[in-house]
Amino acid sequence: MERYGSDTERDDTPLLQRAEEERVQRAPACGSSRYGLALLSSFGFFVVYSLRVNLSVAMVDMLNNTQSDTNHSSSVCPAHANPPRPKHNHTASVYNWDSETQGWILGSFFYGYILTQILGGYLAGRWGPKWLMGLGILGTVFFTLLTPVAADLGAKYLIAVRVLEGIGEGVTFPAMFTMWAAWAPPLERSRLLTISYIGAQLGTVVSLPLSGQICFYLDWTYVFYVFGAVGLVWFVLWTFLAFDSPNTHPRISEQERLYITNSLKNELSTSAGYIPWRAILTSGPLWAIVVAHFSYNWTFYTLLTLLPTYMKEVLGFSIKQNGMLSALPYIGCVVLAVLSSQLADHLRETCLVRTVTVRKVFSIVGMLGPAVFLVAAGYTGCDYTLALTFLTLSSALGGVSASGFNINHLDIAPSYAGILLGITNTFATIPGMVGPVIARTLTQQNTIEEWQTVFYIAAGINLFGATVYTLFGRGDVQPWAVHTSYNHGE
């Protein structure tokens, strides 16, 4: 097992050898099954995040606001001019929920989401990821369609439905990581996984403005019906077009199948059913990812769940403007995530930069950049243009981390990537559970100073995570992740 020497030997030499091997036998990307899977899974994560974030915009319209929509006298900054809302069809109920209740409703999704992370990684490895992911999203779609009924019954029922949605979505990322462990050639990981997971950002980009338009022209209940229907369409496509591995895909070319399986043969464990739990739970590189993932998500979920509220209560944007402007930061995130994935794979394959170096540099940029601009946004006052610019830059730079710690699970233990993601995502879900509650508790009066405190907390946590990952992150397959060497001519 000589490949488990020093970090430099483990990270550089196999990378050079792998680059040369894959250049010779690489299957074309255009029309390939692996890129088809990337697009299909991207649509899946589009659905996942559409169902997750639409409540953030709908919540603005679900509240019983005694002030008219056209004056916005309750906002800190002067209100923006806005055409009068159509009066017809606005028959949906509104509710008298205080700030604390709103925080619990927005955070309740994550109380279910945290429960199925590790279980999702385990079940995906044991029973296959395709149906686990498909049925998980289908369950989320079902409870999304029940959201208006639950809200009418009361806040507790809405919280319960959101928890159940979280349980369904909790298996999706671990399941997809398990699938990519069998589908993604090592030197294409950044590109394939970024295409796949960029769907989450696209779901945010589309659902935020579209939810605002739906609320403006119809009412908030249609937000859940429209995106629920889109989720049903995805499930049908996933059922017929997705497969657990190249070897089970009936239409993959033989060239592509051999290319994928040969590129992964020295990384995947041959001990089927064996999970080295003790080694996993005591792995320093894994805990470095845990800390980075937790820290990044604190900032990410703070913006994801509360940006529409900040847009209305502080900056004075109406429901029609709110969704569109709230989506701007995620458009930047999509663009930088795609560009950074191309650069990351280029640095590793062509420039032969060590994997660990690429992961750390991209993580530093993707975590410190958002921290700096998030704090800066708190000091823009009512300068709307500057505030939106800084919030957009904050979220956009976060997209760089997609090629950093975010896919490092596949570098250190591809055989157990789903389980590792389940572990890190369990801890990374905590910010979604407590972040909105803490933020709304700190912003009872919605003053700029209160929001500055929220932004400072998020930035400080991001700085801590980037520091820990820089010190302890690794980019090579760990010894416990491969149990037998390939000495049978494979």
Image (cartoon, rainbow, N blue to C red):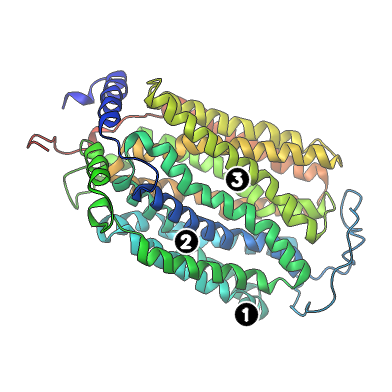
Rendered image quadrant of residue 184: top left
Q: Is residue 51 left or right of residue 470?
A: right
Rendered image quadrant of residue 189: top left
The label on residue 300 is 3
Residue drawn at x 33%, y 58% is: 129
Q: Residues within 10 Å of mark 1 (few under 14, many from 20)?
A: few
The amino acid beneath tag 1 is Val
Q: Does the rendering let one see residue 430?
A: yes
The amino acid beneath tag 2 is Glu
Q: Is residue 201 left or right of residue 440?
A: left
Q: Which residue is mark 2?
A: 169
On screen, residue 139 above or below 297: below
Q: Which residue is mark 1?
A: 149
Q: Secondary structure at mark 1?
A: helix
Residue drawn at x 40%, y 47% is: 35
Q: Residues within 10 Å of mark 2 (few under 14, many from 20)?
A: many
The amino acid beneath tag 3 is Phe
Q: Residues within 10 Å of mark 3 (few under 14, many from 20)?
A: many
